[in-house]
C-alpha cells in the first residue's frame, strides 16, 4: 500500500520546462529529438504498456515516428524523475490527443486504453502525475475553441500551454475551477459524511462545492457547509489540494469544526444536493462499511477521510467511479 503522504493526484515531479513555450520551432525540435516521448490520449484515456514480466503497470509512451496525425499537441515538459516503465529523468514529454481512427492505428485493443480514475491507484507517481496533467490540459483545449471576448476561433500557441484568438491575438491561458472539500468534525472527533443526490443512496463522502467569484476559500467553506448542512462551522484549516481534471477542478481540502454551542444533531441536509447526513466515530464507520460505500481511492475525499481515520480503510465496496 502506498504511503498516503500526498493526495493521489498530487504525486510526482514534472519539470514543466518553461523554455519550450517560447521556442517557436518546438514541434520540429521535439520530433527530431530521439529522447522525446508522447503520452497518447483518446477520449480521456491513456495507453497502458503491455507488461509481460510481472513488472508494475506503466504508461506506454510513443516515439514521434510512431505517432499518427494528432488532433492536438501539447508539451508537458520534462520528466523530473524516471518512470516505472523505464523513461529517464529529463525525457521531453508531449501529450497528443488522437481521434478514433488514429487511436485504432496506435492500439486497437480497447482494454489497453485506461481512464485516469482506475489508472492512478496502479501507476507510479510520475506516470500518474503526467496523465493527470495531460488530461487537464487536453480538457481545457477541448473546451476553448472560441475566444470568450469576441467569439472568433482560437489556435494553439506556446507549445500547447496557451491559445490565441485568431482575430484579436488575445492570449488565453488554461483555467482551473477551485472547489473546496471539507472534513467536518465535532467536539468528540466524529466525522460528518453526506450522501449526494447524484450518487446512489448508500454512498457517503465529504461535503464539497465550487468557490464563487469574489469569495475567499475560508468563506466558501463556511457558506457551502451552511447551505448543505445548516451547521455553522469554524476553525477552518487548510489540509491539502489536488487537481481533479473532470473536467477542470482544483480540489482544496479543508478541515472544519462545528461551531461551539451548536449541537451536532442540528445537521440537516438541504434535501436538494445532500439527501442524508450522518456522524461517524471511527468504530461506527468501520461497522458501517458493510452497508455504505466510501469515496474512491483516487479522490482527495478518501485521502482526507483516511487521514482522520488513522490509516487505510478496508473498503469492501470500492467506489471506482469517482
Ligand atoms: Zn477574440
Image (tube, rainbow, N blue to C red):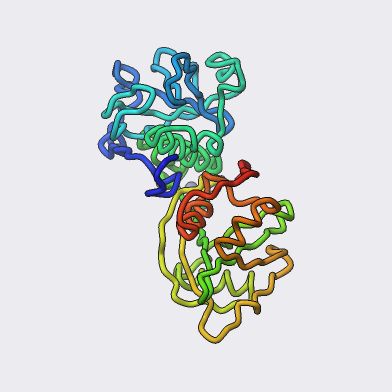
Residue 301 rendering spot, x and y as whole percentages: 53, 54
Residue closest to the eye, 85 or 172:
85
Seen in the picture, residue 77 relative to 307 is either above or below; the reply is above
**Left/right of residue 163 with respect to residue 18 in the rendered view:** right
Where's the N terminus, which quadrant?
top left
Q: Is residue 149 among what the camera can see?
A: no
Where residue 161 appears, as percent x and y from the top left, is: 39, 40
* Location of residue 137 with respect to 27 vertically, above or below: below
Residue 155: x, y in percent? 46, 36
Closest to the observer, 94 or 89: 89
Give coordinates of residue 189: x percent, y percent. Answer: 51, 70
- Residue at the spot x=41%, y=64% of the render? 238
Tell which residue pokes out farthest to the bottom in this image: 261
| Numbered marks: total | 0
Residue at point 65% right, 77% down?
265
Residue drawn 48% across and 52% down?
303
Q: Nearer the viewer, residue 262 or 43?
A: 262
Q: Is residue 215 at all visible to an observer of this figure?
A: yes
265 shown above or below 212:
below
Q: Nearer the viewer, residue 52 or 119?
A: 52
Which residue is rendered at x = 40% and y = 13% of the image? 65
Amino acid at each position: 500500500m502506498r504511503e498516503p503522504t500526498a493526495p493521489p493526484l498530487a504525486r510526482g515531479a514534472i519539470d514543466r520546462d518553461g523554455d519550450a513555450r517560447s521556442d517557436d520551432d518546438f514541434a520540429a525540435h521535439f520530433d527530431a529529438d530521439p529522447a522525446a516521448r508522447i503520452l497518447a490520449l483518446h477520449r480521456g484515456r491513456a495507453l497502458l504498456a503491455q507488461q509481460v514480466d510481472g513488472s508494475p503497470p506503466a504508461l506506454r509512451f510513443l516515439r514521434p515516428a510512431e505517432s499518427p496525425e494528432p488532433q492536438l499537441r501539447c508539451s508537458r515538459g520534462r520528466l523530473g524523475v524516471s518512470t516505472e516503465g523505464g523513461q529517464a529523468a529529463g525525457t521531453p514529454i508531449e501529450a497528443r490527443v488522437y481521434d478514433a481512427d488514429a487511436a485504432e492505428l496506435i492500439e486497437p485493443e480497447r482494454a489497453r486504453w485506461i481512464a485516469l480514475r482506475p489508472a492512478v491507484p496502479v501507476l507510479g507517481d510520475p506516470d500518474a502525475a503526467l496523465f493527470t496533467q495531460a488530461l487537464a490540459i487536453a480538457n481545457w483545449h477541448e473546451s476553448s475553441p472560441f475566444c470568450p471576448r469576441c467569439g472568433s476561433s482560437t489556435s494553439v500557441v506556446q507549445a500547447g500551454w496557451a491559445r490565441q484568438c485568431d482575430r484579436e491575438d488575445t492570449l488565453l491561458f488554461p483555467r482551473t475551477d477551485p472547489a473546496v472539500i471539507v472534513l467536518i468534525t465535532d467536539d468528540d472527533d466524529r466525522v460528518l459524511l453526506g450522501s449526494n443526490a447524484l450518487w446512489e443512496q448508500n454512498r457517503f463522502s465529504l461535503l464539497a462545492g465550487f468557490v464563487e467569484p469574489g469569495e475567499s476559500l475560508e468563506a466558501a467553506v463556511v457558506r457551502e457547509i451552511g447551505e448543505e448542512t445548516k451547521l455553522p462551522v469554524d476553525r477552518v484549516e487548510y489540509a491539502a489540494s489536488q487537481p481533479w481534471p473532470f473536467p477542470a477542478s482544483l480540489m482544496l481540502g479543508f478541515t472544519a469544526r462545528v461551531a461551539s454551542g451548536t449541537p451536532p444533531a442540528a445537521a440537516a441536509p438541504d434535501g436538494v444536493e445532500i439527501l442524508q447526513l450522518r456522524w461517524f466515530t471511527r468504530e461506527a464507520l468501520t461497522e458501517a462499511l458493510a452497508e455504505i460505500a466510501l469515496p474512491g481511492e483516487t479522490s482527495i475525499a478518501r485521502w482526507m477521510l483516511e487521514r482522520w481515520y488513522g490509516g487505510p480503510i478496508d473498503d469492501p465496496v470500492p467506489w471506482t467511479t469517482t
